Image (cartoon, rainbow, N blue to C red):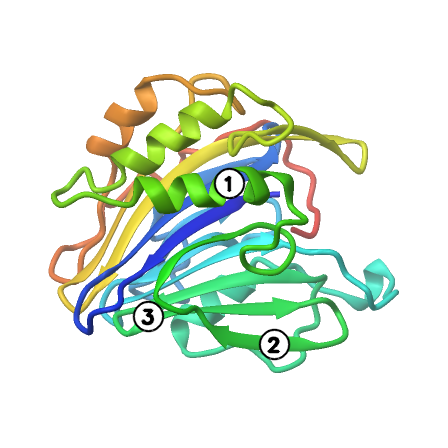
């Protein structure tokens, strides 16, 4: 569920680059990047409308970004003993998350102007480690874990492709994403059955986080889980949030999906 590719620069002062793909039930209502949490002024993110939390969150002033990926929970806790994971990215960009979260397991990629970290929580033990300079992939296991087929197949392709200078720095990576769709078993854009739900890639975000600020662009595939060339133009014209700009004010009535039933994220 979900995929993140991240480039951590070796040189101090250079920005971190991140490409994140959100996989979710297409009928679960959500909102694109926006200021959806009035109780958290200045924070923008991609909102899950059922539980009210975020998949990706940004504090433009603090130059922080966090994105959440699900991970197997080993604790054996019942549903009445856990809360939604959606507060985790919001808490992360606001200053930090609990040492023992009361949520199901997750991976959390945290990015700021000085680099990137991965928080791994399996319901029993939390680990936080700095990501070394280079290009990494994160899914539902450890970073760069070859036990995840799409990481085993495409990590070296992302590393070989690298990034380019300019606003379309993500184009080489998007080329790898497109090629990956030729093999559904290892595709970065996905359509998987999971726990009686079909999870599909609904959103692609490209983010730059550095001392100059934060920029996030987003694009939605025309058909969830599949490649189309509109993703390129979508990222080129996508919403941006920078340190010196007022975040785009999206209409609070904009939502995707149809279900309104409350549920934990």
- Residue matched to label 1: 22
Mark 1 or mark 3: whose residue is earlier in sequence: 1
Mark on residue 82? none
**What is the crowding at mark 1: few (fewer than 14 residues within 10 Å), some, or many (at least 20)?**
many
In the displayed structure, does residue 223 sit left or right of residue 26? left
- Counting every numbered tag in the picture gives 3
Quarter of the rendering containing residue 196:
top right
Q: Say which residue appears at 32% left-offset and 39% top-offset.
A: 161
- Name the outermost residue toward the bottom: 99
| Towards the viewer: 167 or 42 | 167
Quick check: can you spot residue 53?
A: no
Residue 43 locus on image (x, y percent) = 34, 62
Check contact, mark 3 vs mark 2: CB within 8 A: no
Q: What whole-number distance in Å separates the C-alpha atoms at marks 1 and 3?
A: 22 Å
Quick check: can you spot residue 13?
A: yes
Quarter of the rendering containing residue 105:
bottom right
Q: Is residue 31 above or below residue 115?
A: above
Residue 166 locus on image (x, y percent) = 12, 43
In the displayed structure, does residue 257 sit left or right of residue 134? right
Mark 2 or mark 1: whose residue is earlier in sequence: 1
Q: Is residue 87 above or below residue 127?
A: above
In the displayed structure, does residue 30 sit left or right of residue 238? right
Mark 3 or mark 2: whose residue is earlier in sequence: 3
Q: What whole-number distance in Å separates the C-alpha atoms at marks 2 and 1?
A: 23 Å
**What is the crowding at mark 3: few (fewer than 14 residues within 10 Å), some, or many (at least 20)?**
many
Q: Is residue 119 above or below residue 29?
A: below
Residue 125 locus on image (x, y percent) = 71, 77
Frontmost of labels 1 and 3 is 3
- Residue matched to label 2: 127
Mark on residue 115? 3
Residue 36 locus on image (x, y percent) = 40, 52
């Amino acid at each position: 569920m979900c995929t993140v590719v991240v480039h951590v620069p070796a040189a101090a002062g250079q920005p971190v680059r991140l490409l994140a793909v959100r996989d979710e039930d297409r009928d679960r209502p959500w909102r694109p990047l926006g200021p959806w949490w009035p109780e958290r002024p200045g924070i923008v993110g991609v909102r899950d409308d059922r539980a009210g939390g975020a998949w990706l969150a940004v504090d433009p002033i603090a130059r922080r970004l966090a994105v959440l990926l699900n991970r197997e929970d080993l604790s054996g806790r019942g549903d009445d003993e856990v809360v939604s994971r959606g507060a985790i990215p919001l808490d992360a960009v606001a200053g930090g998350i609990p040492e023992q979260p009361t949520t199901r397991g997750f991976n959390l990629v945290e990015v700021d102007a000085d680099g990137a970290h991965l928080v791994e929580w399996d319901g029993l033990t939390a680990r936080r480690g700095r990501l070394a300079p280079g290009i990494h992939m994160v899914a539902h296991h450890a970073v760069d874990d070859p036990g995840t087929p799409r990481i085993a197949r495409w990590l070296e392709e992302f590393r070989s492709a690298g990034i380019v200078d300019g606003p379309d720095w993500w184009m080489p990576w998007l080329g790898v994403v497109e090629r990956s769709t030729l093999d559904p078993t290892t595709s970065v854009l996905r359509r998987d059955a999971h726990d009686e739900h079909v999870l599909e890639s609904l959103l692609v975000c490209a983010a730059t986080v550095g001392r100059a600020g934060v920029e996030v662009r987003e694009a939605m595939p025309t058909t969830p889980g599949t490649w189309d060339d509109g993703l390129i133009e979508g990222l080129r014209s996508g919403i941006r949030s920078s340190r010196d700009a007022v975040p785009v004010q999206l209409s609070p009535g904009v939502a995707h999906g149809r279900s309104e039933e409350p549920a934990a994220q």
